[in-house]
Amino acid sequence: MIEAGNLQRTLAFTGGGTGGHIYPGLAVAAALDDICRCRIVWLGSKNSTDRLAVEGAGIEFREISSGKLRRYFSFRNFTDIFRTIAGFFSSMRLLKKYKPALLFSKGGFVSVPPVVAAFALRIPVFTHESDFSPGLATRINAYFAKKIFISYGQTASFFNKKCLYKITVSGNPVRPRFYAADPEKVRSFFNIEASEKILLVLGGSQGASEVNELVEVCLAGITKNFFVVHQAGPGVEARHEPRYIRLPYIGNELPDILAASALVLGRAGAGTLWECAAAGKPMVLIPLSGKSTRGDQVENAEFFEKKGAARVLVRPCAVDLLKTLNGLVEDDGRLTSMAAASAQIGTLRGAPLIAQHIIEQIIEG
């Protein structure tokens, strides 16, 4: 392992659109901070949530124009071509200004213009894919990248054979707080008895109406066996009643709440899955499915189910959900084995591995 000491260089990061494209990048940035003192500049979209998350981590954020990469016909595809071109030139200007030693991309449509601009300026590009199958942005970025990190070994089969020599299996980067959480803080704050099993319900940072509606219908049955902490998403009113707490968003407290939970119910976004794995938590997953998605959450969920870490319910009815939750809470052996399988996946710690590769590139480059 290379020790970088007080090496001071500027690095550029890019990605955005969802928390899954932001938080793993922030985890890599935190791991870099443990190794050396690097200045990081993040090139991102005008999405206010992205900016708040990045600047909240103490990282400089610079807006660029970007267009969405759609797989379906839309007249906006034509106007977005010009936004993407504008994003390329604004990226060129910023990269020339900051002269980074490397660009690290976490994907999302906003990442394509900076990646192409960095390639044109001969700045090495590293990219990471969180999902089981790569998104369109990552497929494009892969051709310009010097190094491709993937969360699952099987993901390599989705790339062009010419890209295989660039690939390293890293797992999905998770912020350090998830490895050092304190479950007692949560039990003390909410006055939850040590004997109570906590069910954490997560729909991602944007919430999930399907999950929220199912929990609402099943709530009386669920709270017979669980104390429920529910992140319901923006625009949903907070609620606090016996054995049930609903919050629009859980921020810095999430690692501690996750650590205290006996079971997690939620979508199957890569960020949620790997944060649960870092905490060694069993999961019941309701992946986003249907025509509005490319199926990445279903693929992610199936991987965790095959490893024994999760149960997957695709478009379940309330009866199915309640039966699954109650069946697990009554089977401590099953919950324990699922937790162990989840923790085993979580041993693949992507953030420090990727950070070390970045430092090696800086030193050797």
Image (cartoon, rainbow, N blue to C red):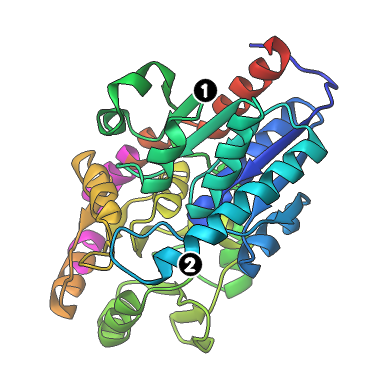
Give the secondary structure at mark 2: helix
**Could you say which is closer to the camera, residue 226 or residue 362?**
362
Identity of the residue drawn at 27% across and 80% down: 214
User: Viewer-proximal residue, 255 or 159?
Assistant: 159
Q: Nearer the viewer, mark 1 or mark 2?
A: 2
Q: Type of residue at label 1?
A: Lys
Left or right: 364 in relation to 258: right
Residue at 26% across / 51% down in the picture?
A: 301
Is residue 165 at least partly visible in the picture?
Answer: yes
Query: In the rendered view, would you say 143 is above or below 137?
Result: above
Looking at numbered disc 2 in the image, what kind of residue is underneath it? Thr
Q: CA distance from mark 1 to mark 2?
A: 30 Å
The magenta stretch is 326-341
Q: Where is the C terminus found, in terms of image quarters?
A: top right
Query: Quarter of the image holding residue 104?
Result: top right
Label 1: few (<14), some or many (≥20) within 10 Å? some
Return the mark for residue 84: none
Residue 266 is covered by the magenta coloring: no
Q: Label 2 neighbourhood size at 10 Å, few (<14), some (14-19), many (20+)? A: few
Q: From the image, tell me which residue sits under label 2.
A: 79
Q: Which residue is mark 1?
A: 146
Which residue is at 55% across, 73% downward? 249
Q: What type of secondary structure mainly makes up the magenta span?
A: helix
361 relative to 6 in the view: left or right: left
Instruction: Where is residue 96? Give x, y as percent.
Output: 77, 37
Q: Are marks 1 and 2 in contact (CB under 8 Å)?
A: no
Q: Please provide percent x and percent y for residue 360.
A: 65, 15
**Residue 296 drawn at (x, y percent):** 29, 52
Q: Quadrant of the N terminus?
A: top right
Instruction: Answer with mark 1 or mark 2, whichever residue precedes in sequence.
Output: 2
Above or below 38: residue 365: above
